[in-house]
Image (cartoon, coloured by chain):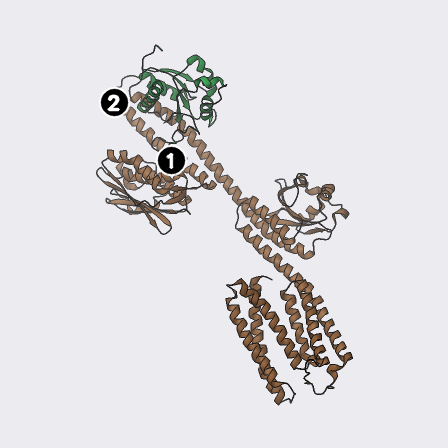
Amino acid sequence: MNEADLLKNSARLIRMRWLAGLAILIATPISATLLSIPLPVPALLGLGVAILACNALLWALARHAQMYREVRTLLAIGQVAFDWLALAVFVHLTGGIESPAVLFFLFHVLLAAMLLPLPITSLYAGLVIVVVAGVAGLEASGLLPHYHVLTGLSPDLHRNALYIAAILFFFSLTVLVTVMLIVPIMRDLRERQRQITLLYESIQTLSSSLDLAHVLDQLAMGIAHALQAKAASIRLLDETGEQLKIAAAYGLSQRYLEKGPVKVTCSPIDQDALRGRPVIVEDTTQDGRFQYPSEVLAEGIRSVLCVPLIGRRGPLGVLRVYGWRPGFFSPQDAELVTAIARQGAMAIENAMAYAELRRADETRAQFVRAVTHELRAPVAAAQSLLRTVVRELAGELNDLQRDILSRLSERLDVLQMLINDLLDLAAGKVEGLEGELTPLSLEAAVLGVVDRLSSQAQEKAIDLRVNYVPRGLTVMASEQGLERIFLNLIGNAIKYTPAGGKVTVTLEQRNDEAVISVADTGIGIPESDLPHLFEEFYRASNVKQLGITGTGLGLAIVKDLVERYGGRVSVRSTLGEGTTFTVVLPLAG
Amino acid sequence: MKQEANMAKILIIDDDPDIVLALRLSLQAAGHEVFDARSGEEGLSRLPQINPDLIILDVMMGTATEGFQIALQLRSPDPRSPLAAYSHIPIVMLTALHSTTDLRFAPDADYLPVDAFIDKPIDPDQLVNTVNALLARQRA
């Protein structure tokens, strides 16, 4: 019995005990006066009060039981001991072996069967018989006084050996039969409860995962554990739908797993299962339906339960559970595993769909990378050649030629920037799927970027400053990505701020987040452009009018990276006054 | 050697003829003697004949990492390797992995044994400065 059960049942028993105590206090005077039953009234009232007082103590203990293990043990033992004693006294006061209250001992037996393991329940039943026999014996021998309550009966009945023997015999028989009836029912109930808990747990882990291998492994292991079976395996249909290939296994030897794929046409068990019907093989030595019978026997598999994994679009494969003795699986097991398999099939389908999406995403990003590389090589070569000509390394140029070639070189610069940004965006999207992030110093990244851009700021006479108090802020990110965020934001701020302006970078900690803002006194962004600013290829209208070159990808890259690191980015701007970008990143650890 | 103090033999290993031409124009203008090879294999095979003072190596040729592999072979610590005689030659690696103003990984003796990186497109002044600085260090 687990502790939550113990506490719950303690509370229930305490409630019942209040009723029992009160019932004695009320029923005793009524029976004694109205029905003229010669009860030992003071003794019974004393018992009632004792029950209530003791129950108050138990109630107080139970309130602290949640906190202290010792109290819980004391509570469990105290209750059992007290109830026995109280009931024995009650039986004694109401006539001993003649008392109909003897039957109340059955309650104890039932409670024990519900709450305690089987061997203790049997012991408990034996003790009940001993206690009743003890009370009868003590009264018969005169060691205890006998209260002759049921006046219609012979006053010597409690000394009549035959009567005592008959009552004890039938009482014992009743107790034993009760135990024999209730124990298997309770055992079944507990087993079902355990299985349902496991089922619930396995479904929970399954639906929270998109990793196919993990889903399959968990499913196989979860089912083998739930049924306490030897092993479990999951076989999925291949593309042709003709072969079942092992996708996950728990408890099977490598040699067994390497026996090869199962041909559906050669395996009537799997055929049946794939049609949606669970199959139980009671005894593998007597069953001719296996494609690999000798391997099955060599592995020590004596019985098999095979259930279908049916997805939304048809059968995906089969789930097999292996028993180490014949007749291991019951129809209830088949039902349970079918239920798990239904949930499992859904989780498998989800994970497969996710893997498919991931593959498509990766293929697309790889394509973009390949294209970008192919685009970059000729531009780089052309640009390299052009620069040697502009530098007059291939002969002198006249002014017009130099001007034309310089313009050509500038256009190639823009094209090169665009290609680089595209490559970063594509690479970022692939990297994002891998999710390899490490704890990095935010301050080092920001200061490094500011350092690198300081000469650029100086050239434009821009006052570039960082406001921060060293706090050792650490965020989960990739090194290049983190630098890229600030290169783009601070680089933009310098680019769009006229000479003599200011760019201020501020680093702060707010709760468990780092807040980095980049404020400039630049040209600002029109309000109508703000909602689209982080879209790929979007460029603010005033920037285009002013003829400032750019790709419209820089902020899309920033947003992509920041979100990959679990953060967010926002912008505030007043046209003609300046812009502030704010990045919020969760702190590591 | 009876060469001019600042003149050096430079071997370019790159499969892009236009990049090779741009490099050649820049380096020749600076007074260097330029040789070229179109693959890593060809470059390594011509080493004894040219005996260059500096090697310029493109990072991506036949495969995405051919340049890396050539650099690793040249700096192989195995003294029995026939290339061991050339392991002292400075190597400049041409990269297209990072854009000019953006991130670049510093030369790392453990990971990639080269002496300098130059990003494509080539800037003639930056190229000549880098090459001359490495040659001066080598002669010192």
Residue type highlighted by circle 1 = Asp
Q: Nearer the viewer, residue B97 or A82?
A: A82
Cα–Cα span, label 1 and label 2: 32 Å
Residue A51 falls left or right of residue A555: right
Residue placed at 54% from the left, 64% from the top?
Answer: A70
Which quarter of the picture shows residue A506? top left
Residue placed at 57% from the left, 50% from the top?
Answer: A346
Give chain A's shade. Answer: brown
- Badge 2 is on which residue? A400
Residue placed at 50% from the left, 42% from the top?
Answer: A357
Residue A246 coordinates in the image, percent (x, y)? 63, 42
Residue B135 coordinates in the image, percent (x, y)? 35, 19
Residue A580 falls left or right of residue B44: left
Q: Please identify, in this view, whether the residue under mark 1 or under mark 2 is nearer the observer.
A: 1
User: Image height check: is A188 above or below B113?
Assistant: below
Marks 1 and 2 on same chain: yes
Which of the chains bears the disc numbered 1? A
Residue A256 coordinates in the image, percent (x, y)? 68, 41
Q: Nearer the viewer, residue A11 or A272?
A: A11
User: Image height check: is A402 above or below A143?
Assistant: above
Numbered mark located on residue A505 in the image: none
Do we see residue A23 in this rendering? no
Q: Nearer the viewer, residue A111 or A306?
A: A111
Mark 1 or 2, nearer chain start: 2
Numbered mark located on residue A421 in the image: 1
Of the 4 image quadrants, the one containing the N terminus of chain A is bottom right
Give chain B's shade. Answer: green
Element marked by disc 2: helix
